[in-house]
Amino acid sequence: MTFAPRFKRILLKLSGEVLMGEGGGLSIDPAVTARVAEEIADVKAQGYELCIVVGGGNIFRGISGAARGMERATGDYMGMLATVMNALAVQNALEQIGVETRVQSAIPMASVCEPFIRRRAERHLEKGRVVIFAAGVGSPFFTTDSGAALRAAEMKCDALFKGTSVDGVYDADPKKVPTATRYATVSYSKVLSDDLKVMDASAIALCRDNNIPIVVFNIREHGNFAAVLNGDGISTVVQN
Ligand code: UDP
């Protein structure tokens, strides 16, 4: 299935883990981040308008802090700050290879990046810049998956691409079940009813309500992002 004629503007959700060093070394590995930036630059060069939402799980998650006795909301704010660090790392890697970017944060941080302003983000896209959205939705008890679905809807993106380190959605954990098979396509309702690990339920519901397909693919595999867009790559598409 080629997406080229269907999709003009896409939102890429990057989990924090895709910026990590192999074997869980550095939480932000500049070499790994540079490779991810190359994949993004390839797709940008093909004329797509690109929004990016970055996660923060490679640095901090509120839920992990809460499990160790921290107040959940405080942990979540720390997690959102982690996403801003990742956004700056991705911005740096993209600009080093000549891709113009702007970072917008849902939590205003005037000295570091722009605040999220939808119309300004729109203008950046018109000017050919990649817009990187940080700090999720800006509130605790949410995730950056929800932030990605929200920004995809607000920015009228044609699809949400979830770049991870697995090549799609399986009917069982492929690390534990050797016969696990990858779905080529799967419906939003099956993802929700079978609790398939794609994104959290509120993000799936928001995409379903706004008819935004979710494409899950491995962004760490060289050339795969561009290949998936052109119909040759490996992915799972979640749609109606
Ligand atoms: N977070 C939040 N509200 C948001 C987005 C993120 O509170 O709108 C916090 C939450 O603690 C989350 C952390 O930031 O665990 C990092 O984001 P996430 O876990 O979504 O990152 P990813 O798994 O994509 O790396």
Image: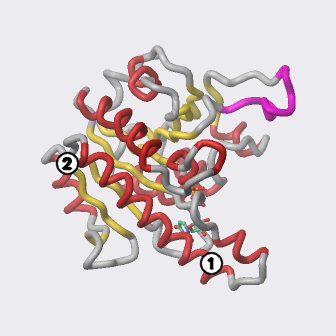
Label 1 vs label 2: CA separation?
32 Å
- Position above or below: 200 against 235: below
Residue 138, position as x, y percentages in the image: 46, 73
Residue displayed at 60% across by 42% down: 22
Give the image's coloring scheme: secondary structure
Q: For the residue marked with disc 1, what is the amino acid?
A: Gly
Residue 195, position as x, y percentages in the image: 76, 45
- Position above or below: 56 against 237: below
Residue 20, position as x, y percentages in the image: 55, 49
Q: Which residue corresponds to mark 1?
A: 75
Q: Secondary structure at mark 2?
A: loop
Residue 196, position as x, y percentages in the image: 73, 41
Helix, strand or loop for the magenta stretch, by majority: loop
Task: Provide the residue span drawn in magenta.
Answer: 169-179
User: Which labelled disc corresponds to residue 198?
Assistant: none
Q: Disc 1, ligand 1: is the CB inside 8 Å?
A: yes
Q: For the residue marked with disc 2, what is the amino acid?
A: Glu
Label 1, residues with CA under 10 Å away: few <14, some 14-19, many ≥20: many
Question: Is 183 on the left-hand or right-hand side of 52?
Answer: right
